[in-house]
Amino acid sequence: MTPEVVVAFDKAKVSDRDTVFITSLVAHALNINVNIFILNRKSINIARAEIRKTEFEKMKQIILDTSDQKATTTALVIYASVKD
């Protein structure tokens, strides 16, 4: 799962159960063997939480490292959109 996918699922308020279903269907459509992956609500929940944490830490570091007001504002806007 990529940060972009997590943001899309979060923005659309897709539940963990629906995320598993959608991910499975997309994998099948792309001829990817789903049986080689651990694909359940818990694994999806953990992956989403880890990606959210990583992205938050990146944005936090940008804010702390920069004195550029525009970059700080951009990072805060991105964080706010991911958080909602």
Image (spheres, rainbow, N blue to C red):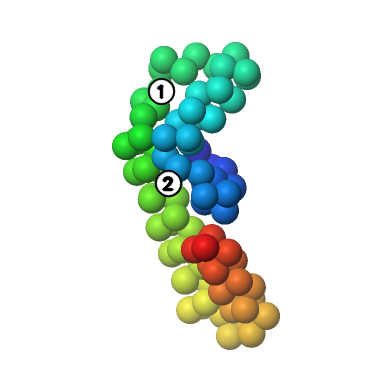
On the question of residue 3 being in view, the answer is: no
On screen, residue 58 versus residue 46, left or right, reads: right
Tell me the residue at 45%/42% (across/down): 15
Can you tell which mark lies on residue 7? none
Q: Residue furthest right?
A: 70
Tell me the residue at 52%/50% (across/down): 13
Tell me the residue at 47%/71% (across/down): 60
Where is 78 relative to 36, above or below? below
Residue tagged by mark 1?
A: 37
Can you tell which mark lies on residue 48? 2
On screen, residue 67 versus residue 42, left or right, reads: right
On the question of residue 76 being in view, the answer is: yes
State yes or no: discs 1 and 2 in contact (Cβ < 8 Å): no
Instruction: Report the amino acid beneath label 2.
Output: Arg
Where is 76 relative to 39, above or below? below
Q: Secondary structure at mark 1?
A: loop
